[in-house]
Image (cartoon, rainbow, N blue to C red):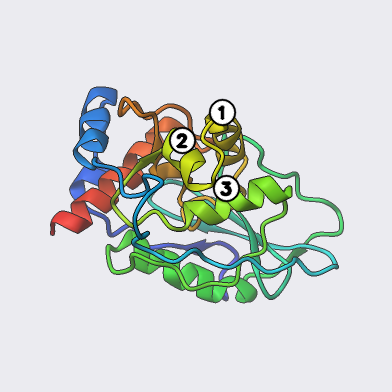
Amino acid sequence: MSTATATVTDTVTETATGAVTAGAATALVQDALPMTVDGGGDRAWDPMEFVPPLDGPPRHTVVGSPVGELLLVGDGEALSGLFMLPDAKYVPEIGGDWVRDDAVFDEVTRQLEEYFGGERREFDLRLAPRGTDFQRRVWRELTTIPYGRTTSYGAMADALGSPTASRAVGAANGRNPISIIVPCHRVIASTGALTGYAGGLDKKQQLLALERGSRAA
């Protein structure tokens, strides 16, 4: 990317760009049930494999998107963070040793453009999220949830072999450092309520609406 701030295309479905009320979003999510990841049967998608992060100063850039600016962080070979700016929780502070490197994120940006344009349902990227072993197990499980479908925290806990750990799964889900690509927005309460999202419930609504709209097209 040659520009200081890259822009991801804003070509999305009308339901994703328009205002979505809490009630409408809940109905939309409930329509996505029955859940795909339910602790039994074959998963629709194989889990993405994570790689160990490399040592050295983090690379970063900022790209625009239909859900606002996105901070991309990586080690030069793998993506370790995708954070929604400016108000998402757990956004890292850019340190003095961080290196602005737009070009290293060209492929990430291209795939995000395709996703927001309704042309991509799965990402094919090297990912290196930093977290505990349990967190990484939860984040890996997130990558098995198919595009446009939802699951619950309890169903994820069952799939991980820890049926009583739904709260721990929820906490790990909330600390997912690679939003959108590791799709924590596809996890909701068993009642169909959206519950929390580090990027904000409005962003969660937009992403779910985009995916449901693309599936219906």
Q: State the image coordinates of residue 79 (x, y, percent, origin top left).
A: 63, 65
Does dot 2 land on a helix, a strand or a loop? helix
Look at label 1 and name its amino acid: Arg
Q: Is residue 213 above or below residue 59?
A: above
Q: State the image coordinates of residue 148 (x, y, percent, origin top left).
A: 28, 52
Q: CA distance from mark 2 to mark 3?
A: 10 Å
Q: State the image coordinates of residue 11 (x, y, percent, origin top left).
A: 28, 59
Quadrant in the rendering for residue 103? bottom right
Q: Quadrant of the C terminus?
A: bottom left
Does dot 1 land on a helix, a strand or a loop? helix
Q: CA distance from mark 3 to mark 1?
A: 12 Å
- Which numbered marker is on residue 138? 3
Q: Quadrant of the N terminus?
A: bottom right
Mark 3 and mark 1 lie on one chain; the one further toward the N terminus is 3
Quadrant in the rendering for residue 58? bottom right
Mark 2 and mark 3 lie on one chain; the one further toward the N terminus is 3
Q: Is residue 154 left or right of residue 73?
A: left
Q: Which residue is mark 2?
A: 153
Look at label 3 and name its amino acid: Val
Does dot 3 land on a helix, a strand or a loop? helix
Residue at the image position 33 percent from the left and 37 percent from the top: 205
Residues packed near mark 2 inside 10 Å, few (<14), some (14 to 19) or many (20 plus): many
Q: State the image coordinates of residue 147 (x, y, percent, origin top left).
A: 32, 56
Quick one: 209 or 6, which is closer to the camera? 209
Q: Is residue 59 left or right of residue 196?
A: right
Q: Is residue 26 left or right of residue 186?
A: left
Q: Which residue is mark 1?
A: 167
Mark 2 and mark 1 lie on one chain; the one further toward the N terminus is 2
Quick one: 55 or 162, which is closer to the camera? 162
Circles 2, 1 touching at the beta carbon (< 8 Å): yes
